[in-house]
Each structure stands twice: as structure tokens, then as C-alpha cells.
Amino acid sequence: MAAVQRLLRAAASSSSSVAAGRRRMATSLAPEQTPAAAPAFPFAGAERRRRPAHERNVQWVFLGCPGVGKGTYASRLSRLLGVPHIATGDLVRDELASTGPDAVQLKEIVNQGKLVSDEIIINLLSKRLKKGEEKGESGFILDGFPRTVNQAEILDGVTDIDMVVNLKLREDIIVQKCLGRRICSQCGKNFNLACIDVKAENGLPPIYMSPLLPPNNCMSKLLTRDDDTEEVVRNRLRIYNKMSQPVEDFYQKQGKVLEFDLPGGIPESWPKLLDVLNLEDQQEMKLAAA
């Protein structure tokens, strides 16, 4: 819990304070100060010791611009590997649906297509990590965090990231995807009405993504997210692209980035992603053999 509190303190500090904080954390992790017991969750146990990879589940980060499909693939891998999928986008939406003090400020930020500040994101993430600690979670897949070098440095100070999966997709296709998103006001499930069929041109491969259509009983209850307008989507992509490169560079220097260009929708992309990760989906294999 003390490490979670450090996340909040670090978010409000300047970059020099973050660097100093990381030096203090490194001192607190010295071997002579390490108790024998391993923590239940790496963030909560940063003051004691970090768990080596062979003693815990994966600790991955998913990067990619808004609408690329981070949540889709991170959640699938979460189920496959048995680790929690922690999506900052979901944390923000949960807070928006609440009556908490940050809900009004968040609504204004999201509707304008702006990115949520480090301080707010880290506060929401800290709450989620505290719950995970209490449940004894080990390992995680982070989706949508970190978005800035400041966030990456804070994260690096308290846990070890094994790999960063950076999903790539053409901007014009992402815009089509975002404009096709719908949510059912009754069941809460997400759908997508866009049928994307882009022909090969200018050396770029063709891409096909079939729509994810709702059942008939949901069709009349579909809602469009307030921030899914072309102006907001393109502004969000512009801001992300400007901010993402330093984060990618941060992890590239550590040799942890796996670049993955999505070749199409889930049927085309999922098997290829598993292949580059050297994983097998036994359920998918059973369905294919049936």
C-alpha cells in the first residue's frame, strides 16, 4: 500500500523529483533490506522486493493509439494467461459513471478529446492496484498505461515490465473503426457497425475487418459514445501520436518493445499475434478442429 501511495506522490512531482524518487526506491530495494516473504502483487511489494519472472505471471504493457484494439487483444491474452487486464480506459469510464468528485472534470476532458492527466490516471490506477493486492493478484496486462514518459518512469520505479506490445494500424482505418462503435444501453455490450474493406494501394496491404453486429433485440438500443465523432477521434489521435513516441523510445532503449502491425480483424490478427508471442490458444484450436 505504501508503494501505491508513492505513485500518487510521484504523479504530483516534477521530473527531477521523479528521478530522485526512483533513486530512493532503488535504495529501499537493496538486498540487505529485503524480507524473505514475496509480495502478493508487485506494486504493493516494491518496498520489499521485486518478484523475478519465474516466480510470477507476465507483466506486460499494451501500447497503441485509441481505437486500435488494445482492449480486445489484451483481454483475450488476459484470459489465456490467467492474469488481470487493467485498462485505464475502463477505469476512466467507471469513474465517469460514478458520482465521485472527479466525474465532472473527467467528463469535460473526455468530451473534448483531451488525454486525462497523469495525476488522475495514477490515482485511478492506484485504487485498482490496491484492490488487486487485496485479492492476491500476481502479474498483469496494462492497457492504456503508461502514456507519458513521466508515467513510464513512475511505473519503472516500482515494478519490472517484461514486454511492451505496440499495436499498429493505419489512421484512416482507426477513424472508421471508432465511428462505427456502438454500445447497447440495455445489456452494456459493445458492437461495431463498420465494415472495413480497404484495397491494397501504394505498397500498403489490403485490410478487411468485418462488422461486429448486435443481435436484433439490441439493434434499437444502440448508443454512440459522446467522444466518437470524427473531429474528436482525429484530435485524440494527433495528441496520442505526439506523446507516444517518447514512451516507445523509453521502452525501445530497454529492448522490450514488440511491434505488431494488425493485418485485419480478430480472425486474421489473433493467430498471428499468438504466433509472434509463441503462445497457443487451446480453445481456438479445439474450435478449429471441430
Image: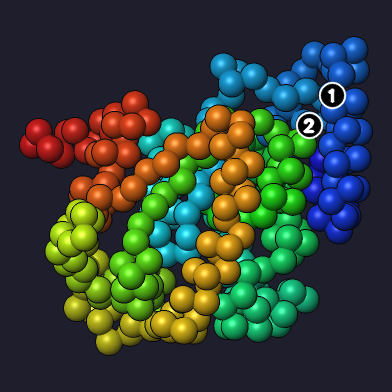
Mark 2 crowd level (few <14, some 14–19, many ≥20, 10 Å Cα): many
Q: Which residue is mark 1?
A: 29
Question: Is any atom of residue 153 visible in this view?
Answer: yes
Circles 2 and 1: CB atoms closer than 8 Å = yes
Whole-percent x and y of residue 206?
A: 17, 57
Secondary structure under tag 2 reads loop
Answer above or below: position of 100 versus 270. below
Q: CA distance from mark 2 to mark 1?
A: 7 Å
Between residue 34 and residue 154, name the one nearer to us: 154
Q: Residue at x 91, y 40 (%)?
A: 20
Q: Amino acid at mark 1?
A: Leu
Q: Earlier in the sequence, mark 2 or mark 1?
A: 1
Q: Quadrant of the C terminus?
A: top left
Q: Residue at x 15, y 39 (%)?
A: 287
Residue sticking out furthest to the bottom: 220
Mark 1 crowd level (few <14, some 14–19, many ≥20, 10 Å Cα): some
The image quarter containing residue 57 is top right
Left or right: 35 in relation to 93:
right
Secondary structure under tag 1 reads loop
Between residue 222 and residue 122, name the one nearer to us: 122
Answer above or below: position of 37 versus 89. above
Question: Is any atom of residue 225 visible in this view?
Answer: no
Q: Which residue is mark 2?
A: 46
